[in-house]
Image (cartoon, rainbow, N blue to C red):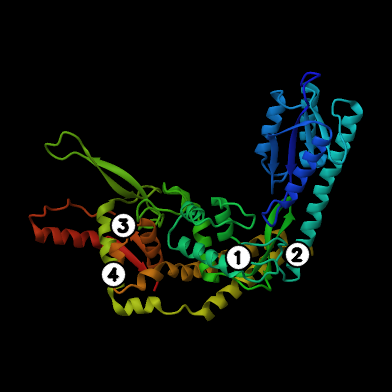
Amino acid sequence: MSTTNAPIRAAIYARISKDSTGQGLGVERQRAACVDLAKSRGWEVDPARIWVENDTSATTGRRPKFAAMVAAAEAGTIDVIVAWHIDRLTRKLSELEDLIVLSERTGVKIATVSGDVDLTTDSGRLVGRILASVARGEVERKGARQRAANQQRAELGRSPHTGRAFGYNLDGTIREDEAEIVRTLFTRFAAGEGLHTLTRWLGENDVRNTRGKLWTRVGVRDVLLNPRYIAERWILRTRDGKRVREYIGPGDWEPIVSEDLFRAVGAILTDPARREFGARGNARLYVGAGCYVCGVCGTPLRTGYSTYKAAGAEKPKQYRIYVCPQGFHVSRRAEYIDDIVERVISRRLSDPAIASALTSDVDRAQVRALRDEANGLRSRIDGFANDLADGLLSARQVKVATDRATAKLREVEAKLAQIGSSSALGGLLGSADPGAAWLALEDPRAKGAVINALCEVRVHRQPRGRRPSDRNPEKLAAWWEQIASTIEFAWHK
């Protein structure tokens, strides 16, 4: 605390949990009222001791400025904390106890526009605890009301979200400028770009989310997995003490992206093998890693390295290989495999008849049929739990039926994802010479996306024999044919 004759040093703290406009008007009103209170009491207000946190929850949010203010109190640079109300400082009883300890140790007092709370006295601590309990109870009641409202909206066929989703207006209509960005995110991700690349692109173009903040990698991922963009209704329910997502049905709002593209992106993001191949996210460092599969067991190949020492060389040389991580069925020199794949894909894309077939419109009736089948399967899976509760099915019957329906649902979603993956070919097939455009591609992520859209590359075991010298063209050509015969292309179309 300051000495008797020194001015009382006030710290101003203002916070608001949700700012839907991003303009900070509510938190500014708090700040102004707190400054007025401090000045009316003759306290010293230094702009360096004004901490403002907008759009920040006191229950779940991280509050660096609140922590900085507490650190200043610990350092003895402030004498009183001024806030709009005690619930602006905390909505947790545990945090209130920390403030009580801080006040007792440092003598810092709490003043609010709605009335002072002296945490250094027993009566003040009682009032503080009551106010914090009331604030916590309001948080819990608000959460219960919100969950009930969301469930009701979902069951009525409306969007279960009351807030504005990026790409939509508050009334659920499409906001075209943002919707175009959403479509771009889906298309570019399906074409092989990673979450970090897309996040950086949004930042470079100063694209903000609905809260006026810069995008994060997690935020971009949430957009790409949000079924709201294909007009599907899902809701969180509690089952066996766990919060699980449950499909409700189609929504009454217009989708922004196609079902097939959404499934293709979802298949990439939720694939457990995505993080096994060294690259971050879905981005590839090399074309074949996670793209080519083992011809023996079907496991995606990893990139590794091997060494050899040529005759007369002082040091061994290192070269890259593709290797099967399950039992090491396959271990092949990467540059040879990539060379064969480059040539085969180029020849296929250079065929006018094949390129024309690939650029033909997707059968929308097929997509609709698959979507309806998937929705029906989800409804059946949800219905099994009700049948168990009503005694119509035993627990074993529900498990068997659920497993079968889930397996079928995965097949249907995989078909939708395969149709959607064709978007990776869009720009390539639009060029004058798709084969040459393929060879000119330098980004391994884009190349991997094209390969996945066209076929599955199965790499079998290495044939016997070494690569012949360039001085013997006939033997070299025969060797390349032998290498090519061990690579299988399972074409999707």
Precedes in sequence: disc 4 or disc 3: 4
Whole-percent x and y of residue 52? 69, 42
Q: Residue 167 carries which label?
A: 1
Residue at the right extreme of this rendering: 123
Q: Which residue is identified by label 4?
A: 435
Name the residue nearer the viewer: 290 or 479: 290
| Tag 1 and tag 4, C-beta contact below 8 Å | no
Q: Mark 2 highlights which residue?
A: 386
In the depicted structure, whether residue 190 falls above or below residue 69: below
In the rendered view, tell whether residue 267 sits above or below residue 371.
Answer: above
Q: What element carries label 3?
A: loop
Relative to 416, 314 lies left or right:
left
Label 3 sits on residue: 460
Of the two numbered discs 3 and 1 in the rendering, the one whose residue sits closer to the viewer: 1
Precedes in sequence: disc 1 or disc 2 = 1
Q: Distance between the residues labelled 1 and 2?
A: 35 Å
Circle 1 — which element? loop
Q: Quadrant of residue 30?
A: top right
Q: Can residue 392 be seen at all in this image of the molecule?
A: no
